[in-house]
Image (cartoon, rainbow, N blue to C red):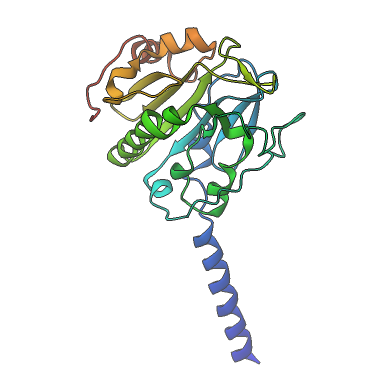
């Protein structure tokens, strides 16, 4: 009987250990929410590995926010491509087929390739709340190039906080008179510690060539265009210093 109990105990330990390895937790709960932007147009939805602020008016997120770790990039989880309704959207959610025939890609805000940590992380990037209408030449071109640059930077820095979103206005039209087509998109990266750095990018929703460095912009300018207060948790003097100017020092292009 004793030997049987020992054997059962070993089996249970092995199963639990395997489960933990398959679904590792975020680096820490605090890191995943410490620098979340203030909501401007929407309401906060918290998924397992990223947050977003969803605008019912524009039927998409005004931003997606997450901590990008080397472990998340190198996790090895394959794409799931399971585009679907986000169950946390309160009303009138976007369906996977709502972009059909529009000529626009279902463009990720939180990229699938940033969430290779495990099945949950990857699959949740395919909620339609994380999608925004991107022109194919933009989504598959310069935007993809910027996403690659962010992953490289995260690996070099040992992790980054990332905020991504559309600049939402009605001036560039809509899909089915309800899903706003953004004229441009932004991305912000931040690393804290003893030598904090921050960099912002603003790109038109169109094909472009060249280095992503040409799209660098101050965070203050992005706040003016979006109405969002990014990184409000930072000490005021540090926030002003990081957000009021462009500094390429320490970043590799």
Q: Quadrant of the N terminus?
A: bottom right
Quarter occupied by residue 154: top left
Between 159 and 100, the one lying in front of the other is 100
Q: Indicate the position of residue 42 as horizontal and vertical percent values.
A: 65, 20
Depicted 187 relative to depicted 94: above or below: above
Q: Position of residue 44 (x, y in %)?
A: 64, 27
Which residue corresponds to the image point at 63% horizontal and 32% vertical from the top-left? 99
Q: Nearer the viewer, residue 233 or 5?
A: 233
Q: Position of residue 117 (x, y in %)?
A: 47, 51
Q: Where's the C terminus, which quadrant?
A: top left
The mark total stands at 0
The residue nearer to you, when weighing 35 against 127, is 127
Q: Is residue 8 left or right of residue 69?
A: right
For image coordinates 67% across by 24% down, the residue present is 59
Q: Is residue 42 left or right of residue 118?
A: right
Residue appearing at x 26%, y 25% in the figure: 211
Q: Is residue 204 left or right of residue 50?
A: left
Q: Residue at x 61, y 11 (%)?
A: 170
Position of 166 relative to 160 (above/below): above
Q: Quadrant of residue 100?
A: top right
Residue 70's image quarter? top left
Q: Position of residue 218 (x, y in %)?
A: 36, 12
């Amino acid at each position: 009987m004793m030997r049987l109990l020992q054997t059962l105990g070993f089996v249970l330990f092995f199963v639990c250990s395997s489960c933990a390895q398959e679904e590792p937790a975020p680096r820490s709960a605090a890191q995943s929410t410490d620098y979340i932007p203030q909501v401007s147009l929407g309401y906060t939805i918290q998924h397992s590995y990223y947050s977003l602020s969803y605008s019912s008016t524009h039927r998409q997120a005004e931003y997606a926010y997450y901590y990008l770790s080397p472990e998340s990039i190198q996790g090895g989880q394959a794409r799931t491509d399971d585009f679907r309704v986000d169950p946390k959207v309160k009303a009138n959610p976007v369906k996977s087929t709502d972009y059909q025939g529009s000529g626009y890609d279902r463009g990720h805000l939180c990229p699938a390739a940033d969430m290779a940590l495990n099945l949950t992380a990857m699959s949740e990037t395919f909620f339609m709340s994380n999608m925004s209408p991107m022109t194919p030449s933009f989504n598959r071109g310069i935007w993809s190039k910027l996403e690659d640059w962010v992953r490289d930077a995260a690996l070099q820095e040992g992790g980054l906080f990332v905020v991504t979103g559309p600049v939402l206005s009605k001036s560039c039209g809509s899909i089915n008179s309800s899903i706003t087509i953004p004229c441009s998109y932004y991305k912000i990266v931040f690393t804290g510690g003893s030598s904090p750095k921050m960099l912002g990018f603003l790109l038109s929703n169109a094909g472009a060539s060249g280095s992503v460095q040409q799209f660098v912009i101050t965070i203050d300018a992005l706040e003016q265009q979006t109405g969002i207060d990014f990184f409000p948790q930072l000490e005021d003097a540090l926030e002003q210093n990081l957000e009021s100017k462009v500094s390429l020092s320490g970043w590799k292009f």
